[in-house]
Amino acid sequence: MTVYLVGAGPGDPELLTVKASRVLQGADVVLHDSLVDARVLGLAPAGALLIDVGKRCGTRATAQSDINRLICYHAGAGGTVVRLKGGDPMIFGRADEELAALQAAGIACEVVPGVTAATAAAAALGLSLTKRQVSRALHILTGHGADGALPAHHWVALANAGGTLALYMGARQITGVAAHLIEAGLPPRTPAVAVESASLPAQRIIRGDIAGLGKALSEAPPLGPVIVLIGEALAGRRAALVEQIRFAADAAACAPAG
Ligand code: SAH
């Protein structure tokens, strides 16, 4: 029996690692999050058992303890089990709980990392999350604490750390996050960008500053997953340039030969 804990990346199937693609193609059972793109799931063999254990926007599809039991149960049956999670499994993916359950059951597991939402969003923006003299740190934090409330982060430390903040699961809490950060000393004009559905056709970029991003998001409510990036490294706009490059490349590819 083999279990792979696999990162599916942010959505675009081309961002799957070669290894993730290979283990998926050999899977007997795939237990996947709801956010995983259908084209990624399509890599599993036709006869593979696909089980959606995901939860979306607070609706709990399968309790974590049941997911742990399901993984162990299917692994015990002897096949190759792939536990497929959005982005990277080790970032806000409860991978530790699943690894602990597997360890307790004496089942070996290999983790296959994936492209996480923060770096997919940076790629979409054409902006680096770290920047010489400007951003020497990257902080990954969640806006979703126990019972959906904003977690009690050390806002003063975050506001004064001088790096980029990558806020996962925080679109609904952005106004509260902004209020805490501004109260803790972060300048209200600090650049803040929300990237919805990074790497997917529905990708949307909402730019602003930390004081105004909540309003901008409420005026155009997102439908897909959103990551919010905050910090001076997000100043500037390079996405237009990236788009131009892509457009030029597409035009060249479409140009008649000769
Ligand atoms: N393990 C995942 C994160 C899971 S938590 C990873 O490494 O990316 C789920 C949160 O991830 C979402 O609420 C959102 O904040 C972020 N997210 C996941 N996919 C995303 C995408 N394609 N675009 C923007 N944010 C995304």
Image (cartoon, rainbow, N blue to C red):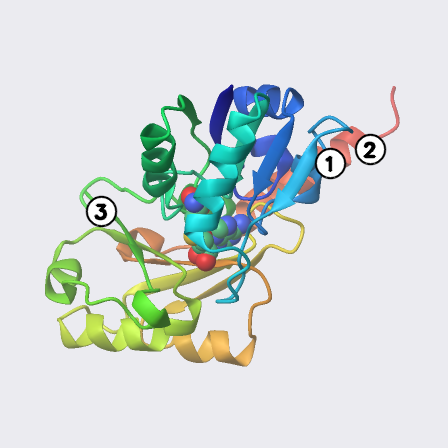
**Residue 256 in picture, x, y percent from top left:** 88, 27
Indicate if the residue with disc 2 has its beta carbon within 8 Å of ligand 1.
no
Q: Judge the density around disc 2: few (<14), some (14-19), many (≥20) Cα neighbours within 10 Å.
A: few
Q: Mark 3: which amino acid? A: Ser
Callout 3–callout 2 Cβ contact below 8 Å:
no
Q: Is residue 122 at least partly visible in the picture?
A: no
Q: CA distance from mark 1 to mark 2?
A: 6 Å
Residue 8, quarter of the rendered image: top right
Q: Position of residue 119 (x, y in %)?
A: 42, 41
Which residue position is annotated with label 2?
254
As shown in the figure, which amino acid type bears the numbered disc 1? Asp
- Name the residue at 39% across, 55% down: 236
Q: Which residue is mark 3?
A: 135
Find residue 161 and report its image quarter.
bottom left
Q: Which residue is mark 1?
A: 250
Q: Residue at x 83, y 31 (%)?
A: 255
> Image height check: is 129 above or below 212?
above
Are the residues tagged 1 and 2 within 8 Å (C-beta)? yes
Q: Residue sitting at 32 percent across and 39 percent down?
A: 96
In the image, residue 35 above or below residue 191: above
Q: Is residue 256 left or right of residue 155?
A: right
Say which of marks 1 and 3 sits in front.
3
Q: Quadrant of the C terminus?
A: top right
Of 188 and 120, nearer the camera is: 120
